[in-house]
Amino acid sequence: MPFKAVVFDAYGTLYDIQSVAAVTEQAFPGHGDIITQIWRIKQLEYTWLRSLMQRYVDFAVVTRDALSYTLRILGLQADAATRDRIIAKYLDLDPYPDARAALAAMKDHRLAILSNGSPAMLDSLVKASGFDAPLDAVISVDARKIFKPSPQAYALIEETLGFTPDEVLFVSSNPWDVCGAKAFGLNVAWIERVTPDAMAAACNKTDLVAPLTLFKALRSQMDELGFAPDYRIAALSELPEIVAKHEP
Amino acid sequence: MPFKAVVFDAYGTLYDIQSVAAVTEQAFPGHGDIITQIWRIKQLEYTWLRSLMQRYVDFAVVTRDALSYTLRILGLQADAATRDRIIAKYLDLDPYPDARAALAAMKDHRLAILSNGSPAMLDSLVKASGFDAPLDAVISVDARKIFKPSPQAYALIEETLGFTPDEVLFVSSNPWDVCGAKAFGLNVAWIERVTPDAMAAACNKTDLVAPLTLFKALRSQMDELGFAPDYRIAALSELPEIVAKHEP
């Protein structure tokens, strides 16, 4: 059976969240990497914790709060203009180099984003990258006031596009997102950007582990949550072939 | 109004989870610290993610899964006996040095634990430390099949002890647990074991940040979740005075 739609996670999947490091490094020379890593981890944690606490605020607020935490614990001061400049990068993240071509190659399918991002953040992001043209829909979890991996978030795909989970290929680089989507019943492709061998080599290289390595240790490898992806790919560029194979 | 009960988080609050590092270091010399840190972070993540995914398994399974993840990404092999020996330390964690005296000093109050731990894990832990004597109740979230900071977990205090949230002092060193308890309406004392100055100094000491420092950066400082504790204390030993002041 062919997939009727291909739905993408945004942050870390179509768009490179590590691209904020250039801005954080400019604002705080020598701290760009650690700010970027702690910021991202706390941003994710806050989405999960607020969802569980039933205290939803949108992703723009979570992102700002996570940055506040990060700067505070590092003992860094930032005026409002500096914070605004750092946050603004989230509205204009670099797409992965192969994202545009992959979307173009699958243009005969319905293409969409399902993201934790707020509608305003996603609108900016998609327009800045020009992905508003190939995408048929940009779906924000804000419509349900709960973040992924809640089933209520993934249910928005069918509510918006009209396709059942088994008709959709969901694509994410985030292992927790992959597991959440599988638990919900979607077909899932996982973009595995760091191989297990590279991961183990980085962790064993030195007694002191650099923040970026620890971050990758926490985020890049498939989680032990009782689910596995249907497809493991190394890059977005491998998607069109997978999708083509499922044509009738 | 006096507090009618004092309810403690277990892991990281009454019991020192860092005490597993001795066992992980023995099993994997040179890796004890990083195993301990990644294991704990993934253990917490899995409680939040499984709760959100509505795929609860008990804390013993989560703890074992998080250890599997940790060893896998570090490229470390462990036979079943080694894994069992590491996991077993969770049943016999060292209490903080001041825990016993603090419980004894508050013996005129109802004292309890509310923990993510499974009933069997908590039973072992409490008996091994001899805390079964001072504690009136050991409450596991397993009764509701969802982990903290879900309101359903904190609701177990009233269901078990019969006291409303405003009659209870909840004690935790975990910032996310403090915020969850406050959101639920409990009085909350936060054990702040790492001062902001010590945190900032550790983060700025070196270009490479040691895993333990990064772990503390992620875990030891109050989170930006819209809530603040009623009491900030440095150690359990400060609790009896706070509780005594609330006597009628």
Image: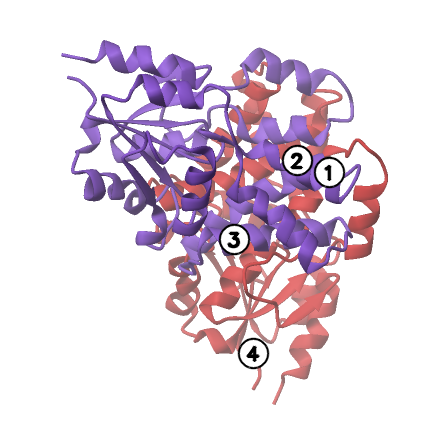
Chain colours: A purple, B red
For mark 1, name the chain: A
At 45% from the left and 58% from the top, the residue drawn is: A57
What amino acid is labelled 4 in the image?
Phe
In this rendering, would A19 be left or right of A183? right
Q: Circle 4 sits in a helix, a strand or a loop, which is it?
A: loop
| Residue hosting label 1 | A25
Tag 1–tag 2 contact (CB < 8 Å) = yes
> Which corner quadrant of the image does residue A89 belong to?
top right
In whole angstroms, how far apart are the C-alphas of marks 4 and 2? 48 Å
Question: Percent from the top left, x then y, of residue A214?
Answer: 65, 29
Tag 4–tag 1 contact (CB < 8 Å) = no
In this rendering, would A196 be left or right of A223? right
Mark 4 or 1: in front is 1
Q: Are marks 4 and 2 on the same chain?
A: no
Q: Are marks 2 and 3 on the same chain?
A: yes
For mark 2, name the chain: A
Q: Which mark is residue A62?
A: 3
At 30% from the left and 13% from the top, the residue drawn is: A242
| Residue hosting label 2 | A21
Q: Circle 1 sits in a helix, a strand or a loop, which is it?
A: helix
Of labels 2 and 3, earlier in sequence is: 2
Q: Are marks 1 and 3 on the same chain?
A: yes
Q: Can residue B13 be seen from the camera position used here?
A: no
| Residue hosting label 4 | B3
